[in-house]
Image: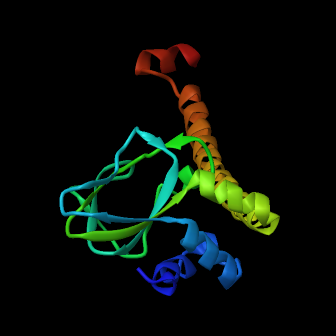
C-alpha cells in the first residue's frame, strides 16, 4: 500500500486534525499494514488494546459493544477503531469483524509513543484533543445535571404539595 494512500484516511480523522501532513505521513509509515479476510476479527471486546485500527478499505461490522441498539452495525472506510489503545493501556469496548477483505493500518502504542518522544508536538496535540473531549463531556454532564435538577425540583415541589393534602376524607375532617 502506497504511503499517500495510507495517510489519506488519517487526514480525514478529527483526532489527527491539526497535525502537519509530514507528521501524519510518519504515523502512517510507522503503522503496521494489515489485511483481514472476510470473517476475521479485527478487534475483540474486553481484550487488551495496544493499538488503534484505521479501516483503509473494505467493509467491516461491529457485532458487540456499547450503545448497540439492534443488530450488527456497518463500520465505514476511514473509521478509527480503539483509538485510546494507541495512547493508553485499555481494553477494546467493541468487537468488529471483516465482512469483505479489509485493508487497515494498526497504529501501535509503542510506535506512537516513540514518535511522540521524537516529536513532542504530537504529544501536545493529543493532550489538547483529549482535553477538548473531556471539556465537552463535562459540559454535557452539566447540561444533564441541570435538566435533572430542574426535573428534581419540580418533583420535589409536587411531593411537597401532595404532602400538604389530606390522605382521606376522614383525615380532612380531623383537620377542621
Q: Nearer the viewer, residue 27 or 69?
A: 27
The C terminus, quarter of image: top right
Q: Position of residue 34 (x, y in %)?
A: 37, 64
Left or right of 76? Residue 159 is: right
Q: Is residue 109 left or right of residue 123?
A: left
Is 152 located above or below residue 104 in the figure? above
Q: Which residue appears at 77% of the width and 58% of the height?
A: 117
Which residue is depicted at the point 60% across and 36% down?
156
- How are the residues colored? rainbow
Residue in the image at 68% along x and 82% along y: 22
Where residue 5 sits: x, y (%)?
A: 45, 85
Q: Residue at the location (42% across, 75% down)?
A: 78
Foreground pick, 117 / 142:
117
Q: Quadrant of residue 77?
A: bottom left
For residue 137, say whether it is visible.
Answer: yes
Nearest the eye: 167 or 60 = 60
Q: Is residue 25 above or below residue 70?
A: below
Q: Position of residue 140 (x, y in %)?
A: 63, 57
Quadrant for the N terminus in the image: bottom left
Identify which residue, 67 or 61, lies in the foreground.
61
- Give the image quarter of residue 168: top left
The image quadrant that residue 137 belongs to is bottom right
- Residue 140 in sight here: no
Image location of residue 119, percent across then percent down? 78, 66
State the count of labels. Answer: 0
Amino acid at each position: 500500500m502506497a504511503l499517500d494512500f495510507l495517510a489519506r484516511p488519517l487526514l480525514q480523522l478529527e483526532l489527527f486534525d491539526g497535525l502537519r501532513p509530514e507528521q501524519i505521513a510518519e504515523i502512517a509509515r510507522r503503522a503496521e499494514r494489515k489485511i483481514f479476510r472476510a470473517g476475521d476479527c479485527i478487534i475483540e471486546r474486553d481484550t487488551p488494546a495496544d493499538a488503534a485500527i484505521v479501516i483503509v478499505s473494505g467493509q467491516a461490522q461491529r457485532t458487540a459493544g456499547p450503545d448497540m441498539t439492534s443488530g450488527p452495525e456497518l463500520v465505514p472506510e476511514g473509521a478509527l477503531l480503539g483509538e485510546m489503545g494507541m495512547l493508553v493501556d485499555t481494553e477494546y469496548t467493541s468487537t468488529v469483524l471483516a465482512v469483505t477483505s479489509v485493508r487497515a493500518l494498526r497504529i501501535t502504542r509503542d510506535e506512537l509513543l516513540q514518535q511522540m518522544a521524537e516529536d513532542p508536538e504530537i504529544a501536545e496535540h493529543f493532550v489538547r484533543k483529549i482535553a477538548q473531549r473531556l471539556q465537552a463531556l463535562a459540559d454535557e454532564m452539566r447540561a444533564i445535571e441541570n435538566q435533572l435538577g430542574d426535573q428534581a425540583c419540580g418533583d420535589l415541589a409536587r411531593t411537597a404539595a401532595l404532602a400538604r393534602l389530606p390522605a382521606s376524607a376522614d383525615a380532612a375532617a380531623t383537620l377542621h
